Amino acid sequence: MMATSQTISEALLHSLFTHAPEGMILVNGDGVIEASNEASCQQTGYAAQALQQLPIYQLFPENPPASDVPFATYKLRQHDGTFVEVLVEVRPFAHKRHLLILHPPDEAVLARQKIAHLTDTIQTINDLALKLNALLIAENPVERIAHIIQEIPGVFGVSVSIYDSKTKELVIRQIAVPPAESGIIKRVNTIIGRSLLGMRIPVTAQMHQRLLHEQIATLGDLHEVTFGEVPKPISRIFHRTFHVDKMYGLSLIEGGELLGTIAIAMRRNAEPLTEEVRKMVGRICAMTLRRSRYEQELQGSEAKFRSYIEHAPLGIFVLGRNGRILETNPAGTQMLQYTLDELQTLTIADIADPTFLEQGLADFQTLLQIGQATGEYGLRTKDSNFLWAAIDAIKLTDERVIIFAQDITPRKQAEQSNQLKDELLHLTGDMGKIGAWQFDTETFEGTWTDEVARIHDVDPERETNTNFGLSFYKGEHRKKIEDAIQTLMENGTPYDLELQMTSAKGLLKWVRTVAIPIWENGKVVRVRGIFQDISDSKNAEEALRQQIALQHQLSQVAATVPGMICAYKLTPDGHASMPYASAALDDIYGLPLQAVVHDAGAIFEIMHRDDREAVLASIRQSAETMQPWYAEYRINHPVKGERWIEGLSMPHQEEDGSILWHGFVQDITPRKKAEKEQAELEAQLRQVQKMDSIGRLAGGIAHDFNNLLTVIQMYADLMHVQMKEDDPLRPKLGQIMHAGARASELTSQLLAFSRKQILKLAVIDLNKQIVELQKMLKRLIGEDIAISVSLTPDLWAIQADPGQMEQVILNLVVNARDAMPTGGQIAIETQNVYLDESLLSSQIEMPTGPCVLLAISDTGFGMDEATRQRIFEPFFTTKEPGNGTGLGLATVHGIVRQSGGSIFVYSEINQGTTFKIYLPASEEAVATIQKPRFELVSQVGTETILVVEDEDSVRTPVCATLEATGYTILAAPDGPTAVSLLAAHNEPIDLLLTDVVMPHMSGRELAEKLQQTWPELKVLFMSGYMDDAVVRHGILTAQVAFLPKPFSSNTLIQKVREILDE
């Protein structure tokens, strides 16, 4: 075998030497010539046989060429004894040999370049020859062939295919790529949906002839290498991704027989493989495959045959006459996933797929009769997995059958995939109403698919031409298609047209026709294109246009309707959206359509937290009962603050199970505010009526009781005068007289509450009266309570009963003392105020004009709203039984009302209480007071103001007054809402106008929180408490502005402008 290898190598070298124009001499390590070419014989004058085994020093006796000197000039002694000067290039060669190249000295440069290339080629060939020659004794020559060629510099990858002469297919047996690119094969397999290794490529007769006659070829790409099995797009990705340039193809031919092919992928910019190298590689590989085949054919012994079976890539099964499996090879056990012992208990019927069982048994009987059978069958593995197998069966004896089985599942899957693609392509044409056509530009004869014929309503078998096709078009559409065809034939310009045609049945259809030219020899020889019925899409476009026009009309109508027209959708999985809403959406919710069209969650985010769950429950109930949906709820509008919303819609269930509501939504805040104000006024009226009724009752009782007391007191006085000093009944009579006096005081209080007591009116100075009472008040309240007095100089006089006013002050101070059992502070304050209809707090029976304000505040535990509503009722008390009559505040209320004034209370739990009494100034004082003008001041503002007030009755007129003056107003009912409102507004504001005492967050806390973001924010506090009470809330300092309630529109406007202009 080694001799054969050596012969092949020498023959190749001898061939190269023979064709080389330069003299070439191969010298071994002992300095003996092993080989020479004809050019060297001519230069030396020796015959080839004479040079063989001649020591090199006989040619260069003076100075033999040294192996370590690449180029040098030497004196060559020719056969006749004469010396000539030559340029010798020394190149190292395999096995310690050297190649001497002889040049004339004047051609040294050119020769050096040529010889260097030739020597590299010879060296490459020699190295490859040695490696490939070793394949003749290798166990797996195909794998070694691939890896040896892949190691050639510049080679990216190699595939070796074996030609199956029976199936006329090339089977890819081995693929080699660099280790770093080992994942490429899997990636390509994934992309093309099949395995490259084992791929069977059908070889047509034409392809077979080409492979025989074109033994070496330069191919375009992977698509061409695989004869179209790898699609062009995948091929382009492969070449671009892995920088592959050339593809070489080698036909492995021996004795005129095609044994296989080798495909070599070259890296981009790599040195190309010379034709000599490729021929040598193809020759040795063909010899290797032939020798491998000879070796297999010569294995006649049982041991060799079993070895073949053991290592065969095919499943080989030996069966008995009854179909029982007797023997198999590892490939067979691996294919079916059984062990050999398990298989030997089965028959062919046990491994056949049930759908192939009947045919398989019939073919097995035919095999027993005629001796051979082939076919493709479905088998089942141990895990019941289905696989396709190509079966070649031969009857060895009457009792033995051998079956060769190859797993062709990938190929069948690919075929099925291709078949499915064809079916899908036909289905696409049918469903998409699209077909293809072609006509010849010389004969104008045409061909079209069945779908094109169907669109024209003609028989698919009917012959067609361009004139026939054009006959279906009329008018401008006929001219368009004729002009397009003419331009395409003259200039090769493709066209894409949408035209109207009349079919053979007289149906008017819209079609799309697209065409491209087919060029040959510089001219258009055929026109090819697609044809599609687009009538449905055209009709849909028209319907859509009409729908858009209708929606435009509806939008115009919706713009004139109060509120917002909308659609609300709820899918079965609970997702909510608003697919349609009129332009009023932004005004009502402060949201753009794109914020809710796909997800209506934004609406629920701004919905008041106390109303959200009730609204969601009403939506669910409407969806379950399919009854109309109606709800009233509050939202926090990003600009307008809290708003009341009303919604009404009708539900409809769609095919996918979704519920779609159509209806309208409107802002009912003005109506709700009016309803609330009306309810508050009605409640106040009921309270007044209630107090009046109680007063009438109390007055009647006091009147009758006074009559009785008069009798009792008069007779008691008579008895007291007539009774002796030492009469034992005299002390008891004294008790009766004392009780009568106390009862008289009680009736006096009842009459004061009922406003029927007789007042001793006088013009009094309230400041003076407070100063005179101050010492007594300090003794009355004790040392643990501080009292502060703030009296306005030049306080207007009032007309009232001095004694009754003294009782009012005493009762309120005592009441304040009782509210502070652990100590605190009482503040007494007087002011001159002018009240008129522009007063911003809506009250009933409130005096107007010049008034004196008396305010008494405490820092006690305060009271809740329910208690505040009842404090002026007779006999109502929060004190322990026995500690109060419940007539104190009722008496105060009666005295104030009988004096023509009004009393108001401001209180919250743990925040203290303030009583404000407004008493009209006396007639003498009024005569000296100039009535102020109450027209709105002309000051105009453009700033932005945030108004925060928990009372709607105060917040609404404040906002209206400031908006009328030109300010931009943001309104909120409490601190947290104000913070959220400003976060959505996302722009700075100029002034915060806030109440001091509010639920959830006080005015001071709100101001501090906002000033963290806007340190320059100006703040104006307003409160029903007096200044001293506000001081206790930590509000009043020299730098903070305060506006006490109640206040007029002018007072508000002037104070706001004053703060903004600071």
Image: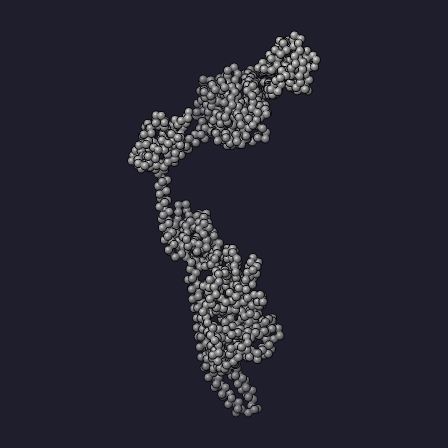
- Can you give x and y, in whole percent of width and height, for residue 907 in the image? 53, 68
**Looking at the image, can residue 751 be seen?**
no
Give me the residue at 61% from left, 11% from top: 42
Q: Which image quadrant: the C terminus?
A: bottom right
Residue shown at the point (57%, 80%) measured from the top left: 772
Q: Is residue 693 above or below residue 963?
A: below
Total residue callouts: 0
Q: Is residue 726 visible?
A: yes
Percent x, y for residue 737?
Answer: 53, 85
Quarter assignment of residue 779: bottom right
Name the spot of residue 322 as percent of width and height, x first: 48, 22
Q: Residue at x 47, y 54 (%)?
A: 604
Query: Quarter holding the N terminus?
Result: top right
Residue 1018 vs residue 233, the one in the foreground = 1018
Instruction: Pick out the residue farthest to the front.
Output: 106
Q: Is residue 603 above or below residue 98?
A: below
Please say if 393 is above or below 417.
above
Residue that extends furthest to the right in the rendered view of this protein: 62
Depicted 614 relative to depicted 83: above or below? below
Q: Residue furthest left?
A: 506
Nearest the viewer among 887 and 429 is 429
Instruction: Locate residue 561 relative to residue 379 in the image: left or right.
Output: left
Residue 179: image quadrant is: top right
Q: Nearer the viewer, residue 609 or 640?
A: 640
* Residue 193 image point, x, y percent: 49, 31
Which colouring convention does the figure follow? one colour
Q: Outermost residue, top direction?
A: 80
